[in-house]
Image (tube, coloured by chain):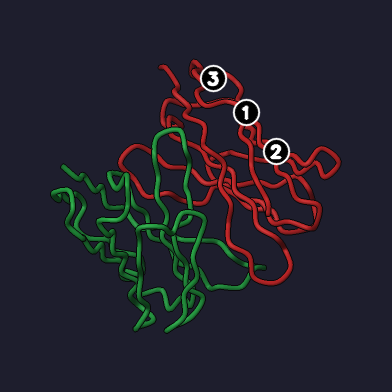
Amino acid sequence: AQSVSQHNHHVILSEAASLELGCNYSYGGTVNLFWYVQYPGQHLQLLLKYFSGDPLVKGIKGFEAEFIKSKFSFNLRKPSVQWSDTAEYFCAVNRASGYSTLTFGKGTMLLVSP
Amino acid sequence: DGGITQSPKYLFRKEGQNVTLSCEQNLNHDAMYWYRQDPGQGLRLIYYSQIVNDFQKGDIAEGYSVSREKKESFPLTVTSAQKNPTAFYLCASSTGTSRDNEQFFGPGTRLTVL
């Protein structure tokens, strides 16, 4: 079974700071990778996803993530955060072959101070 | 508007009572899912259904039951056997194929058992 590890439970940044949230997964085969975001009081929504091809994936609101297969990592980045990026971020993975449910990490709570 | 509805938003029950949480989707998705979200635990899969009249246990199915009699609906019953039922419950749906398993989430139901 696959598992997902998110390195930081809480991150506090000032506006305009750069962001990198770590995500590592454990599974030996080919995977699909996702980052979801949960803004306060809102639905969980997809930020970006990786299935194949270019390992650098761009998502909504200026976020991007890089898949590094050799490190089993899929870190989320944003060059300059805004107060509105305050949210909880979840990394998720599933197997690329056959039917596979998503496995989520425990989440990282990001607080951006104005 | 296409989406997933969960009702009610807040639910209170006395210990020892069964309670059913509703989830409806009009996205024409084959697959539906129930997750439990606890602080610092991320999302944990309770049950999922790939198609009508079929469902499988997830990682933490004990004390829960589901049914899938219609494509649009996937109700979750929290039984008195569930030791720690107080939690935030999220329903999701997807097209069902592993390749494009982006899951869409409902707004959630916060269950408090007194």
- Hue of chain A? red
Secondary element type, mark 1: loop
Residue B53 percent across, percent down from the top left: 42, 84
Residue A31 percent across, percent down from the top left: 73, 56
Establish if B38 lies above or below A53.
above
Is A22 left or right of A47, judged from the image as shown? right
Tell me if mark 1 has few (under 14), some (14-19) or many (20+) residues whose alpha carbon lies within 10 angstroms of its own: some
| In this rendering, the label closer to the viewer, 1 or 3 | 1
Secondary element type, mark 2: strand
- Hue of chain B? green
Subunit of label 1: A
Q: Identify the disc placed on residue B76.
A: none
Q: Disc 3 residue type?
A: Ala
Residue B112 percent across, percent down from the top left: 21, 44
Residue denoted by label 3: A16
**Marks 1/2 same chain:** yes
Residue denoted by label 1: A7
Residue denoted by label 2: A24
Q: Disc 1 residue type?
A: His
Secondary element type, mark 3: loop
| In this rendering, the label closer to the viewer, 3 or 2 | 2
Subunit of label 3: A
Quadrant location of the N terminus of chain B in the rendered image: bottom left
Q: Are marks 3 and 2 in contact (CB under 8 Å)?
A: no
The residue at the point 40 percent across, 45 percent down is B37
Q: Nearer the viewer, residue B64 or A86?
A: B64
Is B60 left or right of A18, judged from the image as shown? left
Q: Are marks 1 and 2 in contact (CB under 8 Å)?
A: yes
Earlier sequence position, callout 1 versus callout 3: 1
Whole-Å distance between the Cαs marked 1 and 2? 8 Å
Whole-Å distance between the Cαs marked 3 and 2? 26 Å
